[in-house]
Structure formats: structure tokens, C-alpha cells
Amino acid sequence: MFTGNGIILQSSLLDLPGICHGFSTRFGGVSTHPYTREMNLAMGREDEDDTVRRNGEIFASALSGGALHMENLVSASQVHGTDVRVLSSENCGEGFSVPAGEDCDGFVTDVPGVLPIIRIADCTPVLLAGRKADGAPVVGAVHAGWKGSGGGIVRAAVEKMTALGALTESIRAAIGPHIGTCCYEVGADLLESVTKMAGEAFAHAYCIPRRIDENGVQKYTADLTGMNLHWLMTAGVKREQIDVSPHCTMCDPVTFHSHRFTGGKRGALGAAVGILPGYAVSPTNP
Ligand SMILES: [Zn+2]
């Protein structure tokens, strides 16, 4: 279940010892431009970089109870691919307090104090948390637009987490606010592209005929939630370990940044997950 505190949304499924996470809203930040206010977490979108850094500090602090800061965040230029990077403490601050590293659309880490963040405004944010056999946490953050959702970037992230030692059966996922099936109308070109990526059965399951438009052209509804659920479950994550946000970004542009609603004149939401600094597994802290 997703709950909010006026600044961030959190999933009860990821409320786990040693782990902190959050999905930003438009509230609580210091951006003043009409496109980006109040909380914009992407550089290069109307705000001064320092404004975005201040928003990063507010967001990181809000989701971690003050334990993590802007300098802990790690972001990268997102390229709608399926590459997932493994982060260490050397990556802290990338894209915020130090230059960004390699482009990618997902991150995993098992290092406390590293806070990967992905940016979205209609695309799907997925946050992941799991544990190793000794109880040590492993986390992941994924940006999945239709390309990442069709291409299965969440499956790639789960595989990187298990490569770090996470037990598949321990992995939980929270699919955050994104454009819902209520609003995500697409053309036959997208159906074709998804077919090439993931096959006909997948494409027809998640790109469903919607209406014939005024020019007699067939339109489709793309189901990003369904695509990501498919790949998560293919990777071995149980359905009951996956939380899905009920929010559609385009239906509620007051609360969320929506690329479609604004025609691109918008800021960016963030989704981040990390392991609290100093967290160590112990017999009383399993
Ligand atoms: Zn909607």
C-alpha cells in the first residue's frame, strides 16, 4: 500500500529494516518556475542546478529521516535502455554534487549510504529491495518507459541483485506513480516496436485496442504496469511481493509531473532507494 506525508509517497512493502525509499511528488521543493515547481529533481529543466541540488537534499532527507543527503544521491542520464549499473560508495553524488557517470536506466547496490535515484514524468519508476542469506540488504531503482517496460529492464535489475547475493524469494518491488492505462494512448508503431522487443503474445497482452480515432486510425492502450509485473514475475518475484501505486501521473498533474499532460513543459519526479548508513545485520537486527 502506498501512503504519503505531503512530500513523498512510500510503499509499506518496502518498509524494511535498514532500507529507506521514496517517490517524490511536486510538493516540498524550492523550484518556483511554473513548469518545475515545487519539487523538480532533474537538471537542465528551467531550474538552476543549485535549485535541483536543494530539492535533492530535501528529498533525500525526507525519505531517510535525515540520515541521507544530496551527496548520497546517484543519478545518470537516462537513455530508455535496459542497462543496470552496480554502484559503490565511489559513485555517491553523481549527477548532483559531482559529474554524472555512465548513462543508464537502472541501478543496484548493496552498499549502505548509496542512494540511487531515477527520474520520471509518466514513465514507470520501480524500486526494489531484497536480502542476502546473511540478511544484508540489496536495493535497486529502475526507470522504465515503454522501451524499458517492453525490454524488461526490471528483470535485468533483479538479475543484478541476485548476482550481488540477494535471494530471489526475498525481493520486493514497488511500482510507483506513472501514466496509467486510463491515459496512455499509443499508435500501431508502439505495438510494432514492442512486438519486436518481446514477441507478439507480450505485445498483444499489454498493447490493447482502445478506439478508432477521428481519422479512422486504430489507437491502443499501453499497459506499463502489466509489462513490468510480467518481467518481475518472470524473474521470480512473487505477485504478493509487488506493490503497485494507484496514481496516474497524467490524471493528477497537480501532484505529479506529467510529460504528456504538459507537452514536455515539466519538471521531473524522483524515485530513490538506499541502505541506511551504518546498518549492519546482527542477531537482534535481522
Ligand atoms: Zn490517467
Image (tube, helix red, strand yellow):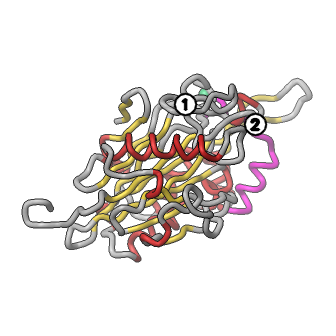
Inspect this view and state whether residue 223 appears.
Answer: no
Q: Work out whether mark 1 precedes mark 2 in sequence or the reverse, and give the earlier one.
A: 1
| Residue tagged 2 | 264
In terms of secondary structure, where does tag 1 sit?
loop
Question: CB atoms at circles 1 and 2 under 8 Å apart?
Answer: no
Residue 146, position in %: x, y?
Answer: 66, 50
Magenta segment: 181-197
Membership of 275 in magenta stretch = no
Judge depth for marks 1 and 2 and give the one in front.
1
Closer-to-camera residue (147/20):
20
Amino acid on which disc 2 is placed: Gly
Q: Position of residue 75 (x, y in %)?
A: 56, 58
Tag 1 residue: 26
Q: Find the residue positioned furthest to the front.
A: 50
Marks 1 and 2, how far apart at CA: 15 Å
Q: Which quadrant: the C terminus?
A: bottom left
Residue most extreme to the left: 284
Q: Residue at x 73, y 29 (%)?
A: 262
Q: Residue at the location (48% across, 56% down)?
A: 73
The answer to whether residue 193 is above or below residue 161 is above
Kind of residue at badge 1: Arg
Which quadrant holds the N terminus? top left
